[in-house]
Image (spheres, coloured by chain):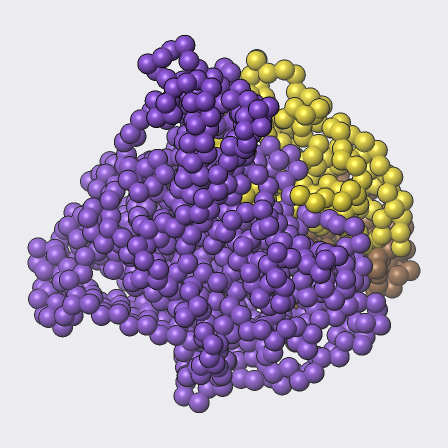
């Protein structure tokens, strides 16, 4: 429901960086080439757990390489993701490791004139290790007497001890859980195991760093946050921030893997400073596979429900395997509680989360940050409860879901807001129609070799980490909007666009606010020196927070413009409107009541210049004070070959409530991409580790770390996406987020579809043909 | 101990030569005693070099020898060793008559790998999961080898010694693959299961049936990724030969094949799954091949 | 071993001195400054490095530069002619098939090869041909739409004759690039 006809928002157009991307002209970090530039390589631990006894760099130096070891790097312990506020920021790493905590951990690095020479130098490094017991699985890491992976970590100004390799734990209890379960007619308790999947972003982590003559540095990194990268580099290398300039370059996919400053960034900076020349560090795919994964979790979930389908109580126990470093375990445990509390109303709930260090690749956020895990468990169990109650799952969920007027935890208990727009019922109704929900077979009733089933799951993601008061999470942003002397507009915004179209949406929001044609609004190339702070493009906050900041700046620039218009037209600013004129390629300022008084934005801006009145520009900072949920609903139809266990996605209907749809074509792309990654999570992907060596079974090669390709996506005729007709009153032009919501409930929809097709519940991801066949054989 | 490889680069120094003839290639192999490798499509060899699972000082480029790229139909089907997978998949000589081979080539990894990869490379790489090999085994392929000391022909099922190992001598190369002629009553099929469509086989099966009336006069049942080398199932073939196909017979043959193979559990699948799925694919492939041979539906 | 080779890159003959172990991907990106072709995995699993050699879609990360001596090489930079986008490039933008864009060059080269060979592909043809090009953003549907749409346009009467496959202007050699 749009409040007024809109000119830019809701219209599809070529994305602003589109021509660059289809012609190969776009510059990613790995494409940056500088004069005198050297190339770097990183020595990575072959052991999962080892003390570093010594590093001999003489062989590498004899080849002309510059070497960096623990001895060379500042002894600053940091956390690479500075999104949590300082009291909640667990810092446990240095630029290069003091001890190897996972296979692939960076131990030393070299730079040389060519990558081939750097590689030779790398192999000339001699490292002696004292190998420790690899604590690859959580059970082993938590065993009494196990070697501490980190003896202490830094929290605020203190070193705090780590007991039993538990990095952090969090318990939340609301209401009388005992009484709630006592009231229930049906109580089900199940355990869900989610897989540890690799982000598989197309571009490997890359960075170029150039030391500047003034002692500063310029950095071109793969990152989701240029400002946080800058602050961390300033802190680690003791540089004032005005001498740390981080450039925004295009990023080849990320999905959460670059919320934190990538480990190679400060390594490259250290090498460049030592070598006194530009250095480029592009990781190989085999290194990247050892660099980041989605949090693996084991979730015990117990839910109680009355005979008439009202939830009475819930108990969730989460064990998260975080790998060798704590990137964001505390916020993970917080948000997982929040996603759970916000899916369905629970009069009483108990949440117990623990995050355990293991000798594996550090885990980090991946599209949904704990939400795909929670949604898999909750949406599976809700489906099972509906079956136990002989209720339609849609009816059961609508009876219990947190909707309009309810409280939404956008980023754990400290980030809450009241839901003001709610498209969930509409999404369920429309999706059910599109997939033919009412005609789906009874669970397990299908016969024959090939069996079809339909499953549904719903969920959401937050739009930003905004809240009325400061909490555990930093969230603010800003923008500069500048009306040029010909009436075109520059938007200067520090936010990253991962490809989803965030910056195009921001440009459209500015165009809409100013009343100029959208194609006259440009997005400026930026760096940290020329922009005000933005925390990071994450938490589905790009359009909602980033767009709102740009809208606020545009509004103020417009006020300045209209003041000048009053000077020229002699009409009160409040009586003036600006509307785009596509033929003129201009916004036209006029007063509907006085038709002969009009001037284009370009003509007025030119007058401002020639009369030396001044620039028409405004910079604004914005703290979102709400975090509206972007609802999403998945209906998936699968076909199972019961002889081989092979699963085919035959149809899918994905609905999104993102409020006003700003980029319709790219919003569809978010949902279709969410399906592909969700299907990968549900059916295909799993980064598995050898429990003894701590090596990846894939050995870091994509050959054995498969993600869905074009062949795995459903036929176009079977794929439908649709949008709820909602308006978010707190969002820019009624918009909220979409990105992470797009994938969150997908795996649960697959599990429910398989349960419908086969009458078998799968509670461990990924649901491979091997598991399906074993379950079918066990059921026979 | 794990070594991190660098897939950006080929690390070792390399000489590259393109011989003008097969004889010259053999001479080069001998000259570089053990340090030269034949390079065809590169989709296996260059990966192995990058991942440091193979070594070479000299690569002998074979892609541009026209005689090695040829596909001819004299007395069966002759595939030059450097014939690309894609050229075989699209050859009019293959279509229909050698359906299992065509299907194996179409199921081969990705378009780019089909364009680059060659049948000779796929065979000599000697992977237990090589897609073309079960199909070639089904058509009694004989490997034409040429070395400095002359030529010899080796039945394909005697070529493989183990994973990555063949009976080829150091100065010997695969020149061609000769497939047996097919008759009007011949039908064949290839089936494969991977984790995704573009994948190394978790298990693959090729079946060839020669129909005579209602009976199977002769047959081949070959499987991939279920033993150290691609294998024929003699038991399944024995069960089928001379019989009139029935549901029970097909099941017996599948069971015989599943019992005979030696699958393992690895990162791609489990031994139990492979054993079961191999039986399923054998049944499916027999039914398809029989239909293509003009046989009546098996009940 | 270093050797002089001649290759025709996007329509222009180039004489290059390359090492025996140099990969075409790195020669294009580093020596020729054609950074549109991407490294994704280095072992032929992702398709991001796809270029066309004598018209065929080939993995440049698994191709020795010396082995393409005398060949035509087309990269993504060679698709647009005199600043005019190829219909496939336009269709990719029209259908929003470009998100992060890192897979896009490889997708374009594989798809262009398909359309040149099969002007009216079916949806299944597109999927079979392009399953070797991974994309993590789009879920592929918009890319399938783009290729089918481009096929319509290629054959459409309103389209000008298709420009020659090769012959686009090229960037200056090895120029430093700072955004």
Which of these two is toward me, A594 or A37? Answer: A594
Q: Position of residue B106 (x, y in %)?
A: 58, 42
Q: Which residue lies furthest to the bottom in this view?
A: A145
Chain A's shade in the image? Answer: purple
Q: State whether residue A27 appears in this view.
A: yes
Q: Going by the image, does A381 lie left or right of A88?
A: left
Q: Which chain is yellow?
A: C
Q: State whether residue A141 appears in this view.
A: no
Q: Which residue is drawn at 44% across and 15% down?
A: A598
Q: Where is residue A605 in the image (x, y as percent from the top left)?
A: 53, 25
User: Relative to C92, is A70 above or below?
Assistant: below
Q: Position of residue C56 (x, y in %)?
A: 69, 36
Q: Going by the image, does C139 lie left or right of A370?
A: right
Q: Position of residue A501 (x, y in %)?
A: 48, 39
User: Relative to A595, is A471 above or below?
Assistant: below
Q: Which residue is drawn at 74% across and 70% down?
A: A67
């Amino acid at each position: 429901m749009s409040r007024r006809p809109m000119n830019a928002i809701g219209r599809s157009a070529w994305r602003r960086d589109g021509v660059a991307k289809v012609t190969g002209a776009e510059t990613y970090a790995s494409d940056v080439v500088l004069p005198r530039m050297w190339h770097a390589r990183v020595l990575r631990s072959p052991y999962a757990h080892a003390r570093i006894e010594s590093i001999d760099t003489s062989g590498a130096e004899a080849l002309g390489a510059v070497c960096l070891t623990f001895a060379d790097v500042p002894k600053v312990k940091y956390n690479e993701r500075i999104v949590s506020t300082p009291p909640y920021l667990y810092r446990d790493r240095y630029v290069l490791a003091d001890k190897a905590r996972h296979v692939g951990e960076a131990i030393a690095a070299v730079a040389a004139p060519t990558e081939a020479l750097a590689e030779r130098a790398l192999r000339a490094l001699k490292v002696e290790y004292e190998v420790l017991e690899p604590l690859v699985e959580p059970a082993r890491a938590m065993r009494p007497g196990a070697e501490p992976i980190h003896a202490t970590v830094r929290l605020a100004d203190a070193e705090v001890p780590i007991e039993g390799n538990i990095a952090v734990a969090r318990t939340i209890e609301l209401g009388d859980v005992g009484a709630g379960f006592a009231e229930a007619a049906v109580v089900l308790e199940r355990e869900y195991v989610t897989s540890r999947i690799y982000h598989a972003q197309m571009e490997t982590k890359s960075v170029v760093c150039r030391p500047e003559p003034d002692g500063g540095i310029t950095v071109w990194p793969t990152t989701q946050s240029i400002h946080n990268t800058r602050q961390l580099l300033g802190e680690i290398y003791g540089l004032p921030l005005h001498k740390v300039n981080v450039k925004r370059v295009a990023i080849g996919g990320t999905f959460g893997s670059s919320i934190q400053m990538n480990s190679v960034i400060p390594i490259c900076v250290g090498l460049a400073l030592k070598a006194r020349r530009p250095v480029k560090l592009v990781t190989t795919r085999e290194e990247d596979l050892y660099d980041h994964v989605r949090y693996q979790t084991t979730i015990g979930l117990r839910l109680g429900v009355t005979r008439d389908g009202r939830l009475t109580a819930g108990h969730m126990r989460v064990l998260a395997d975080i790998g060798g470093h704590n990137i964001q375990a505390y916020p993970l445990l917080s948000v997982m509680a929040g996603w759970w509390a916000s899916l369905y109303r629970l009069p009483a709930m108990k949440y117990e989360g623990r995050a355990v260090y293991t000798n594996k690749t550090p885990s980090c956020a991946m599209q949904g940050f704990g939400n795909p895990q929670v949604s898999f468990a909750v949406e599976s169990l809700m489906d099972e409860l509906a079956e136990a109650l002989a209720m339609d799952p849609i009816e059961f969920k609508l009876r219990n879901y947190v909707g309009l007027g309810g409280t939404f935890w956008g980023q754990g208990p400290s980030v809450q807001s009241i839901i003001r727009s709610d498209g969930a019922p509409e999404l369920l109704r429309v999706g059910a129609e599109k997939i033919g929900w009412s005609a789906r077979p009874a669970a397990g009733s299908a016969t024959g070799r090939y069996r079809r089933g339909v499953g549904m799951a719903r969920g959401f993601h937050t739009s930003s980490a905004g809240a009325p008061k400061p909490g555990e999470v930093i969230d603010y942003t800003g923008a500069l909007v500048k009306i040029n002397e010909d009436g075109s507009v520059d938007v200067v915004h520090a936010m990253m666009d991962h490809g989803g179209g965030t910056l195009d949406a921001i440009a459209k929001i500015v165009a809409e606010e100013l009343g100029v044609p959208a194609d006259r609004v440009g997005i400026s190339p930026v760096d940290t020196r020329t922009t005000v702070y933005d925390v990071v493009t994450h938490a589905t906050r790009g359009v909602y927070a980033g767009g709102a900041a740009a809208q606020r700046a545009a509004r103020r620039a417009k006020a300045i413009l209209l003041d000048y218009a009053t000077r020229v037209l002699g009409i009160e600013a409040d009586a003036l409107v600006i509307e785009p004129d596509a033929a003129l390629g201009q916004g036209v300022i006029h007063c509907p009541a006085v038709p002969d008084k009009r001037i284009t934005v370009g003509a007025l801006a030119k007058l401002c210049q020639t009369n030396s009145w001044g620039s028409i520009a405004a910079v604004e900072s914005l703290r979102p004070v709400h975090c509206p949920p972007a609802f999403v609903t998945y209906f998936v139809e699968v076909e199972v070959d019961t002889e081989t266990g092979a699963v085919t996605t035959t149809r899918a209907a994905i609905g999104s409530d993102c409020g006003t749809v700003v980029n319709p074509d790219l919003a569809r792309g978010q949902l279709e991409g969410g399906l592909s990654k969700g299907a990968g999570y549900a059916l295909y992907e799993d980064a598995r580790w050898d429990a003894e060596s701590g090596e990846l079974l894939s050995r870091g090669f994509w050959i054995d770390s498969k993600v869905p390709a074009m062949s795995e996506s459903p036929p176009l005729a079977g794929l439908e996406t649709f949008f709820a007709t909602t308006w978010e009153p707190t969002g820019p032009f009624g918009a909220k987020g979409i990105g992470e919501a797009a994938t969150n409930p997908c795996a649960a929809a697959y599990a429910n579809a398989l349960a419908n097709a086969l009458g078998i519940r799968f509670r461990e991801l990924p649901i491979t043909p091997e598991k399906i066949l074993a379950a079918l054989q066990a059921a026979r | 101990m794990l070594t991190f490889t660098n897939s950006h680069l080929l690390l070792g120094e390399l000489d590259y030569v393109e011989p003008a003839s097969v004889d010259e290639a053999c001479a080069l192999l001998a000259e570089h005693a053990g340090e030269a490798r034949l390079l065809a499509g590169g989709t296996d060899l260059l990966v192995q070099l990058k991942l440091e699972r193979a070594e070479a000082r000299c690569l002998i480029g074979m892609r541009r020898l026209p005689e090695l790229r040829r596909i001819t139909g004299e007395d069966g089907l002759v595939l030059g060793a450097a014939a690309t997978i894609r050229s075989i998949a699209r050859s009019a000589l293959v279509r229909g008559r050698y359906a299992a081979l065509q299907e194996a080539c179409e199921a081969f990894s990705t378009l780019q790998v089909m364009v680059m990869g060659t049948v000779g490379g796929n065979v000599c790489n000697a992977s237990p999961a090589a897609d073309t090999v079960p199909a070639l085994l089904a058509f009694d392929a004989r490997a034409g080898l040429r070395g400095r000391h002359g030529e010899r022909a080796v039945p394909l099922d005697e070529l493989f010694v183990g994973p990555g190992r063949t009976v080829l001598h150091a100065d010997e190369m695969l020149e061609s693959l000769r497939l047996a002629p097919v008759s009007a009553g011949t039908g064949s099929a290839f089936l494969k299961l991977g984790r995704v469509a573009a994948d190394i086989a978790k298990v693959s099966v090729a079946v060839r049936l020669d129909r005579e009336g209602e009976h199977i006069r002769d047959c081949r049942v070959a499987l991939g990724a279920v033993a150290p080398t691609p294998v024929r199932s003699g038991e399944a073939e024995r069960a089928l030969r001379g019989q009139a196909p029935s549901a029970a017979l097909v099941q017996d043959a599948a069971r015989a094949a599943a019992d005979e193979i030696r699958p393992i559990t690895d990162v791609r699948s489990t031994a139990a799954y492979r054993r079961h799925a191999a039986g399923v694919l054998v049944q499916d492939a027999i039914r398809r091949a029989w239909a293509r041979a003009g046989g009546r539906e098996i009940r | 071993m270093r050797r002089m080779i001649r290759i025709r890159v996007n329509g222009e003959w180039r004489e290059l001195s390359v090492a025996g172990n140099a990969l075409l991907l790195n020669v294009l990106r580093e020596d020729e400054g054609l950074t549109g072709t991407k490294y994704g995995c280095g072992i032929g699993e992702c398709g991001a490095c796809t270029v066309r050699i004598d018209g065929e879609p080939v993995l440049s990360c698994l191709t020795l530069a010396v082995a393409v001596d005398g060949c035509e090489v087309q990269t993504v930079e060679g698709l647009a002619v005199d600043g005019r986008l190829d219909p496939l490039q336009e269709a990719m933008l029209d259908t929003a098939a470009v998100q992060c864009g890192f897979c896009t060059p490889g997708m374009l080269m594989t798809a262009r090869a398909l359309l040149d060979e099969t002007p009216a592909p079916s949806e299944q043809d597109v999927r079979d041909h392009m399953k070797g090009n991974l994309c993590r953003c789009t879920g592929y549907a918009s890319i399938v739409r783009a290729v089918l749409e481009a096929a319509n346009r290629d054959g459409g009467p309103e389209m000008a004759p298709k420009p020659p496959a090769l012959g686009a202007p090229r960037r200056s050699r090895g120029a430093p690039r700072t955004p």
